[in-house]
């Protein structure tokens, strides 16, 4: 069932929208107060009878499905009458709102029968009895994501908005991934630029009174956004909005809050985080990272009292290890020749990151893993085309120079290629030294070092000591952990590690200082203890740690290692496109590592290859076909304007087998093709517990061949592209 109204009169009424919004502001404010049960002006709270499920955005289909299931349960179960409002998704007349992915989630994935799509951009339509009839029968309303000012233009101050609130007043549920609209101050509501914090649309629906909501605050690096909004130093907030009463709620991706009355609960992924910003508690000298408190999954918060109800001091360890699409696993830990042979990586385990390692002294075995072998010509770290097979390398402490020399030139080149092609690097002590150019004032490039951090580092001269680390207010590590909200981590083991000056040096222009030493009256005091460097968008990120927090399995030292890993992983290089597909020309991806032609090389286990093609208005009917090497499973994806992956493709062909075809009528513009090989090896820890051995379809280590063809509506004869 659906109720869709066209946009024919949209532009005719847009000029009147601003005036209508201003005239209805006072009425909306009065309605908001009655809606939350007569809250005092300075209080924040949600509906007393109904429930909100406010989603912070994200890309995980699994997490969205779990959150949507909770929404359906609150609405009464599978028989509930659900209204989905996809208005924020588009302003285009050709957009098919009935096929929005969240409509498909409700109808196809969850099998819900009583789902109605309600949409218009015409405010006059939003005032009609016919349009609001499904809302009056609804147990719950869900707003899809998109540009939320579209919801303001269509519904604010109309009969439709009043009926949304009536759903809550009769005990119903409202939710969705349009999060900010559910507060009273609309964040990032500028029609021309969604990055503008306080824009030309400022009034939300006020389901939560005296509140400003932002999304994807951690993954989007937006922790300081709400602090700036609530401070409003440029006085941009509409005077009709009580700025001093506002509470900020920052919801991370794949996370949601469930709000009933004054109680807020955090749900979502295992490491869900919600940041609460209370300007009433700030002082003039309050540091940026202390202007919010972090709530993890399971925590509850009293909005009116502005205090925690249920504590959740840190995120629980994930029960199931996760793997990022496009990589075999997350981390490879190097503990080989002349390094500590660590066999557990606590931060990886607490974060649920998949990892493998080498933890032995056999140089030949080490180099077989790093360089390659007959079974795996490109080595464990790289795919056949030289792209990183893991997201990050972590290198333990020990002797940097002797370890680097043990890798020999091919091993060091493999690590450099890993970084230059987008893999990230993290090292502690010797691992930190290894990444650099040299030490102290030496001018030459040190033999054995990797030179991916293109500067010298300095010796601390501190042996077997315990040191503290200051976390600067602008440190990227504060995006992930709060460290007790005091900007300090104590009692970190240190043994002949390295540091950087924060005052002078060529490195300062391209190096981020993430933490500094607390060693009063000693050489590295207030010098860099942890730092990061990213050479370009295509490279990975280097995160170097001068000390040894990695051996600790709990507390703030574990938090420190976790935050370093997360920042390094966030710095993976931008996906590379293999090339542009030409109409009806077969592109053969059959090369091997030794051919040194990565644009035409085979695909590896769990790897993606990306291609582009352009669609003109004259040839909208497109066929994409892949024919893969038998014995391997391939998936095929399409997406407009950005790389196509399983999580967000608009068209997909999946399932067992090596041949896949997509036939689709596509809009004009640049399209991306994603080819995924889902075949992978089985990894098992060797009886020595020093390394992993592979079994199963190990031929995939040297790649699976395939050919790919794009054919437009009128296809000429086929030729070969090599």
Image (cartoon, rainbow, N blue to C red):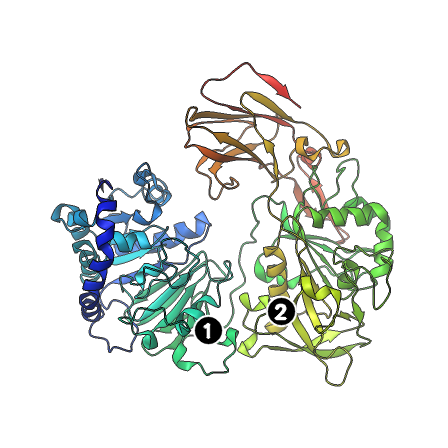
Position of residue 345 relative to residue 34, above or below, is above
Give coordinates of residue 134: x percent, y percent: 18, 47
Q: Where residue 696 sits: x, y (%)?
A: 66, 37
Q: Is 572 situated above or below 469?
A: above
**Sequence order check: which comes first, mark 1 or mark 2?**
1
Q: CA distance from mark 1 to mark 2?
A: 19 Å
Label 2 neighbour load within 10 Å: few <14, some 14-19, many 20+: many
Taking the spot 13% from the left edge, 48% from the top edge, the residue there is 128
Q: Quadrant of residue 410?
A: top right
How far from the left and from the top, in percent, is residue 586?
59, 22
Q: Residue at x 51, y 61 (%)?
A: 221
Seen in the image, is 521 located left or right of residue 130? right
Please name the residue that numbered disc 2 is placed on: 560
Locate the N terminus and report the quarter of the image it occupies: top left
Residue occupying the point 28% across, 48% down: 84
Q: Are marks 1 and 2 in contact (CB under 8 Å)?
A: no
Q: Residue at x 75, y 74 (%)?
A: 494
Q: Nearer the viewer, residue 648 or 69?
A: 648
């Amino acid at each position: 069932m659906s109720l869709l109204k066209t946009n024919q009169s949209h532009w005719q009424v847009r000029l009147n929208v601003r005036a209508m919004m201003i005239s209805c502001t006072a009425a909306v404010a009065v309605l908001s107060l009655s809606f939350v049960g007569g809250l005092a002006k300075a209080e924040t709270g949600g509906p007393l009878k109904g429930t909100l499920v406010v989603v912070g955005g994200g890309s995980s289909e699994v997490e969205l499905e779990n959150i949507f299931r909770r929404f359906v349960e609150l609405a009464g179960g599978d028989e509930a009458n659900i209204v989905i409002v996809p208005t924020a998704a588009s302003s285009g007349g050709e957009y098919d709102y009935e096929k929005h992915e969240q409509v498909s989630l409700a109808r196809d994935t969850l099998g819900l029968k009583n789902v109605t799509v309600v949409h218009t951009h015409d405010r006059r339509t939003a005032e009609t009895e016919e349009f609001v009839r499904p809302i009056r029968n609804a147990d719950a309303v869900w707003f899809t994501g998109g540009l939320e000012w579209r919801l303001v233009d269509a519904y604010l101050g109309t009969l439709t908005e009043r009926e949304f609130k009536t759903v809550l007043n009769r005990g119903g549920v409202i939710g969705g991934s349009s999060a900010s609209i559910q507060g009273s101050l609309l964040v990032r509501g500028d029609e021309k630029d969604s990055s503008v914090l306080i824009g030309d649309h400022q009034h939300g629906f006020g389901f939560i009174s005296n509140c400003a909501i932002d999304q994807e605050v951690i993954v989007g690096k937006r922790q300081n956004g709400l602090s700036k909004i609530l401070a409003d130093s440029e006085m941009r907030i509409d005077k009709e909005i009580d700025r001093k009463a506002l509470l900020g709620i920052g919801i991370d991706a794949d996370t949601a809050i469930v709000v009933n009355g004054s109680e807020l609960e955090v749900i979502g992924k295992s490491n869900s985080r919600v940041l609460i910003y209370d300007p009433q508690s700030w002082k003039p000298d309050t540091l940026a990272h202390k202007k919010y408190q972090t709530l993890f999954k399971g925590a509850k918060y009293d909005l009116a009292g502005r205090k925690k109800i249920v504590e959740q001091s840190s995120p629980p360890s994930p029960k199931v290890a996760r793997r990022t699409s496009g990589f075999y696993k997350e981390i490879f830990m190097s503990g080989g020749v002349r390094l500590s042979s660590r066999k557990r990586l606590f931060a990886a385990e607490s974060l649920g990151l998949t990892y493998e390692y080498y933890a032995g002294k056999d140089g030949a075995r080490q180099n077989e893993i790093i360089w390659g072998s007959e079974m795996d010509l490109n080595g464990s770290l790289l795919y056949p085309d030289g792209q990183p097979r893991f997201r990050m390398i972590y290198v333990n402490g020990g002797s940097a120079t002797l370890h680097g020399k043990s890798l020999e030139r091919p091993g060091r080149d493999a690590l450099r290629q890993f970084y230059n092609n987008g893999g990230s690097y993290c090292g502690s002590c010797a691992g930190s030294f290894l990444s650099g150019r040299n030490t102290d004032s030496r001018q030459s490039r040190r033999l054995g070092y990797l030179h991916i951090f293109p500067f010298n580092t300095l010796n601390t001269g501190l042996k077997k000591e315990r040191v503290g680390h200051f976390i600067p207010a602008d440190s990227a590590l504060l995006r992930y952990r709060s460290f007790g909200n005091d900007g300090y981590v104590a009692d970190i083991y240190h043994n002949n590690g390295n540091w950087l000056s924060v005052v002078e040096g060529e490195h300062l222009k391209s190096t981020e200082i993430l933490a500094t030493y607390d060693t009063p009256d000693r050489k590295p005091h207030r010098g860099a203890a942890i730092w990061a460097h990213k050479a370009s968008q295509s490279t990975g990120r280097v995160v170097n740690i001068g000390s040894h927090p990695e051996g600790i399995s709990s507390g703030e030292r574990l938090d420190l290692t976790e935050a370093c890993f997360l920042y390094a992983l966030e710095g993976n290089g931008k996906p590379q496109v293999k090339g542009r597909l030409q109409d009806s020309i077969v592109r053969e991806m059959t090369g091997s590592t030794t051919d040194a032609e990565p644009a035409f090389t085979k695909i590896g286990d769990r790897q993606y290859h990306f291609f582009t093609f352009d669609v003109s208005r004259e040839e909208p009917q497109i066929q994409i076909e892949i024919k893969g090497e038998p014995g391997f499973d391939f998936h095929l994806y399409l997406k407009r304007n950005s790389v196509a992956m399983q999580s967000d493709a608009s068209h997909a062909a999946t399932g067992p087998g090596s041949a896949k075809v997509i036939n689709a009528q596509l809009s004009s513009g640049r399209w991306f093709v994603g080819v995924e090989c889902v075949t992978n090896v089985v990894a098992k820890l060797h009886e020595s517990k020093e390394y992993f051995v592979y079994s199963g379809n190990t031929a995939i280590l040297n790649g699976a061949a395939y050919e790919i063809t794009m054919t437009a509506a009128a296809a000429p004869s086929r030729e070969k592209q090599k």
